[in-house]
Amino acid sequence: MPTREPPAPRLHRAGPLPADLARRLYRLMLTARMLDTEAIALQRQGVFPAYVSLRGQEAAQVGSAAAMDPERDFAFPTYREMAVALTLGVDMVGYLASHRALWHGGLYNPLTSRFAPINAVVGGPVPHAVGWALGERLAGRTGVAVSYFGDGASSEGDVHEAMNLAGVLNAPVVFVCQNNRWALSVPNERQIAGGSVAARAAGYGMPGVTVDGDDLAAVHEATRTALERARAGGGPTLIEALTYRANPHSTSDDTSRYRDPAEERAWADRDPLLRARAAMEASGAADAAFFAAAEAECRAAAERIRDGVSAAPEPPGTDLFDHVFREPAPHLAAQRRVWEEEVR
Ligand SMILES: Cc1ncc(C[n+]2csc(CCOP(=O)(O)OP(=O)(O)O)c2C)c(N)n1
Ligand SMILES: [Mg+2]
């Protein structure tokens, strides 16, 4: 397969964040990092059947989600947006319940937290985001949908259809593609023929912005600008946040089969947490005492959530059948009888 040079990206840059915002977002990134580590350990201990790590994508997720208005906007996540959930104040025990297979899509309230159910269909949530955004406008409200998807999802038909419709109808949506360089074992150069997801925006009649996804301030600023534009009736924006999936695709994956370990080692210099810390030290937003306190606070928060999800009671298995149809369906009743006999 020929590899093409990507077009020169229009990199969105930003100055340092206000000190209080930088400190708040750093704590969220650090909590997400620690909770991610705890979640991997829970999978290794057999508490979670599987888990997908977001390590490396903390700035892309926290920076974008923190730009949202949690009263009006709505995030449509994939399966990897744990730090978006944390930033939006989702009940994290409820969120992680889906990884414990206690409930599909999580045991949190999507309506109050403005964070849609976890969605494992690659590209699937993108049309949902556009539909929600159009509904929001028809209702005369000013909410904006933030649609998360990956580089792999960018080549799904659903994503093309959704972005084109959003462009044609000027829908209030911010499309956030976290390009973490890998779609399971498929690298960017075998996924994105033109070399850039953001460059496709021109074909959908919307601005395309490439941003260093490991630069917290730049992601935040790019998302804030796109949200303002959509809220003011300016229509959708496509943001491509260039980042890196530092861990395997999931706890079931083995990267040694398809990627060079040197690439993973090189990532260490780009670690968004170290970069956020360096930016705060350079701007004087935080000192050593802040980082020491944040370490202790975030660790305690991550451990509280870990213990909460480990101890969470299993919901009754009959819930499986209770929320499928409003009216009782005979075939479902038959399946329920079989299931009850099996678990008895
Ligand atoms: C419609 C669909 N096709 C295939 C899969 C299997 N699958 C799960 S994750 C994944 C890779 C997705 O990569 P990307 O969109 O880059 O997201 P990332 O996992 O890197 O966050 C694939 C192919 C799926 N879940 N859904
Ligand atoms: Mg990817």
Image (cartoon, helix red, strand yellow):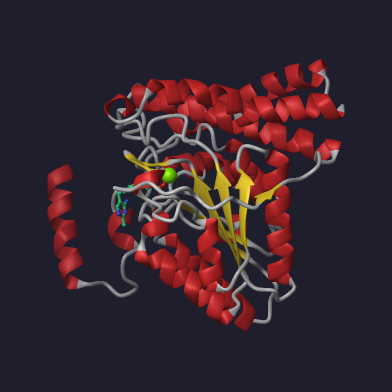
Residue depicted at 80% across the width and 24% down the height: 281
Image: 265 above or below 32:
above
Kindly give the residue lying farthest to the right in the view shown.
Answer: 284
In the displayed structure, does residue 103 sit left or right of residue 117?
left
| Residue nearest the observer in this picture, 244 or 7 | 7
Q: In the image, ligand 2 is in what quadrant?
A: top left
Among the 4 quarters of the image, the one containing residue 25: top right
Do we see residue 86 in this rendering? Answer: no
For the residue pair 46 and 183, the one nearer the viewer reads as 183
* Residue 256 can be seen, yes or no: yes
Residue visible at 75% across and 36% down in the picture:
24
Going 19% across and 65% down the picture, which residue do you hit?
Answer: 333
Place of residue 118 in the rendered image (x, y in percent of width and height, measured from the top left): 44, 52
Figure check: 27 above or below 322 = above
Residue 341: horizontal and vertical position, in percent? 13, 49
Instruction: Identify the residue at horizontal 68%, vertical 39% (top origin).
Output: 216
Question: How far across and down, in percent of the image, does residue 191 sit?
Answer: 36, 50
